[in-house]
Image: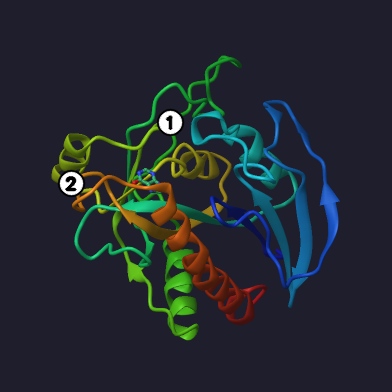
Amino acid sequence: MTQTIAIIGGTGLTELNGLTMHDVHDMHTPYGAVSTPILEGSFGGARLLFLSRHGRPHKIPPHKINYRANVWALKELGTTDVIAVNAVGGITSRMATRAICIPDQIIDYTYDRDHTFYDGSDGKVVHVDLSYPYTEALRSQLVEAARLAGLPAINGGVYGATQGPRLETAAEVTRMERDGCDIVGMTGMPEAALARELKMGYACLSLVVNPAAGKSKGVITIKEIEAALASGMTDVRAILAAYMERFAGK
Ligand code: HPA
């Protein structure tokens, strides 16, 4: 089977420059509109798709993203593996601003999102295993790609997915830390579960752009987030390029 890699870009990564994308897919899905038309290119022996999760320009807040439409459209286009990029807050001390984490677990604190393709509307009850929400082989390749790019990533960590769009309270972050979360973001779920339901590989590159609420002296400012995003996404792009070079279509 030809590998088709889909990159879902998050905040700070609405475009993939440097790669020639020769097709644009304006997808219509049974679940409604996709965040943006999906771009297609190729690299080595692999097909590459790119979808900007928040729209292009960035205009869809995390709780309004149509995760089902996005994931369904990627599957429909033949995606075998999804690399999801997201910006997160750092909870535990190893998750300093500008660190890149490749998480291995998730806790879902989101609510009111359309979070499954198996919603019972067709009279079927399906329970999908999500013990290990990220695909281990893909995770290891991303860890290796980061090493090759000279930007070692943190291998493993628990992603706490919150509803947003507001940031958390300090007490919520303390509770999340007690729960075992290392990072906090608003887009990790239901995306990972939906990818599993449609049997695609899925792993995340999570860029830490601020200390989570209560983890630094002051309040969280958009200015600090934007500064970390600007420099950190350059690192994320380098890791993606190293991944494509080393692993795509191999
Ligand atoms: N909390 C939730 N989502 C985020 C944060 C945060 O601190 N930073 C970037 N995305």
Question: x and y percent of residue 115 in the render?
Answer: 49, 29
Q: Quadrant of the N terminus?
A: bottom right
Mark 2 vs mark 1, CA separation in Å? 28 Å
Proximity of marks 2 and 1: CB atoms separated by less than 8 Å: no
Q: Of discs 2 and 1, which sits in the foreground?
A: 2
What residue would you read off at disc 1? 127
What residue would you read off at disc 2? 177
Front-most of residues 167 and 221: 221
The image quarter in which residue 248 lies:
bottom right
Q: Quadrant of the C terminus?
A: bottom right
Residue 205 appears in the rendering? no
Q: Give the left or right position of residue 247, taking residue 206 as reference.
A: right
Residue at the image point whose x is 18% and y is 52% from the top: 217
- Disc 2 crowd rating (10 Å Cα; few below 14, some 14-19, many 20+) is some
User: Is 172 drawn above or below residue 76 in the view shown?
Assistant: above
Q: Label 1's element?
A: loop
Question: x and y percent of residue 231 in the render?
Answer: 49, 69
Q: Give the left or right position of residue 225, taking residue 54 as reference.
A: left
Q: Amino acid at mark 1?
A: His
Front-most of residues 233 and 198: 233
Q: Amino acid at mark 2?
A: Glu
Question: x and y percent of residue 58 in the render?
Answer: 62, 44
Q: Label 2's element?
A: helix
Front-most of residues 145 and 213: 213
Residue 69 appears in the rendering? yes
- Disc 1 crowd rating (10 Å Cα; few below 14, some 14-19, many 20+) is few
Residue at the image point whose x is 40% and y is 31% from the top: 163
User: Is 189 drawn above or below residue 111 in the view shown?
Assistant: below
The image quarter in which residue 111 lies:
top left
Front-most of residues 93 and 31: 93
Q: Which mark is residue 87?
A: none
